[in-house]
Amino acid sequence: SKNPDTPLYLDSPRALSFSTSGHSLRVAGRSVPGAKVYVDTRRVPEVIDGRFDVEIPLVEGLNEIQVLAVVDGDAGTRRRPPTKLNLVVISEPNPGPSAAERLRSQDPVALRAVLDAAAQDPWSQVDERVSFPLVIGQVARTPVGETCHVRIDGMACSQEARREVRVGFSPVLASACAGEEFPAVVELQECPRDLDEGRRIQIAGTIRGAVGGRWGLRTVERPLVAASAWAPAPWVEPAPAVQAPPSSPAEGG
């Protein structure tokens, strides 16, 4: 068109939303010569031919950074509308436990207290780490640059019970909710294919706030959980093998 948007290309970072263990973020890319580029509201000096390269400090937790490029028209050029890119970066400088460790149940009494409170008032439990089973209701996948994000609406449980039962003639370990069930929203920084409606998964993450909306016939605030790990959580699984006690010398002789 006669007035195209200002070109803006990022070479670093490659995704618009991601997590990092670093204390700073390199923002590098290119626009057209003479364009003004702003990163996190600060003017970035042009290196050469519209290229820029700057290091931005990060705070621990959520960082929302805007990259803006604009050409202000002068006697020799036309004005171009600005182009904006929004970066969402989660900084976790201190490496946390492994995914398997995050998925393991925390102290059940303390964990249930946090989840029960979050079911009533999610904002009261912001930044609390939680782990819980979730039955998937809806899944929304959103492409973001070269990556993909998932938002899951489902029913969470504040405490899981596991008991050995018999199905047919075989013993199995069955799981069920023994605490409060409440609607929750989970965000994943990946797009697994095997997330289907009705499936039950185990989530570990951090409560980031609340998301309002309709649930059934009510308008509720649902806890918003940024997931750091997940795994399938079957309703039933094979019962653990029973080891026979060692035989005594008399029995063996």
Image: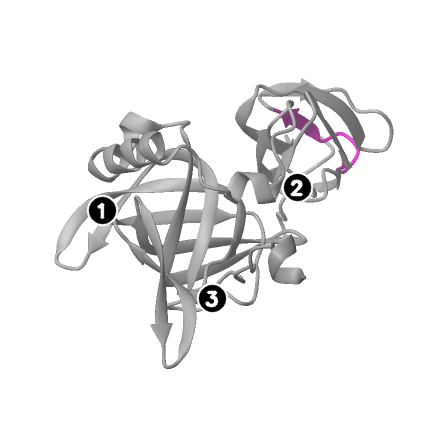
Horizontal side, residue 112 vs residue 127: left or right? left
Task: Answer with the quarter of the image where residue 197 lies.
Answer: bottom left
Q: Give 171 or 50, whichever is nearer the viewer.
A: 171
User: Any magenta on residue 219?
Assistant: no
Q: CA distance from mark 1 to mark 2?
A: 52 Å
Q: How many marks?
A: 3
Q: Nearer the viewer, mark 1 or mark 3?
A: 3
User: Residue under circle 2?
Assistant: 6
User: Residue under circle 3?
Assistant: 237
Whichever of callouts 1 and 2 sits on the residue coming sooner in the sequence is 2
Does the residue at mark 1 contact the one at mark 2 (Cβ under 8 Å)?
Answer: no
User: Residue under circle 1?
Assistant: 180
Residue 137 coordinates in the image, percent (x, y): 34, 62
Magenta segment boundaries in residue numbering: 30-39
Residue at 63% x, 18% y is: 42
Helix, strand or loop status at disc 1:
loop
Local crowd at mark 1 within 10 Å, few (<14), some, or many (≥20)? some
Whether residue 1 is visible: no
Helix, strand or loop status at disc 2:
loop
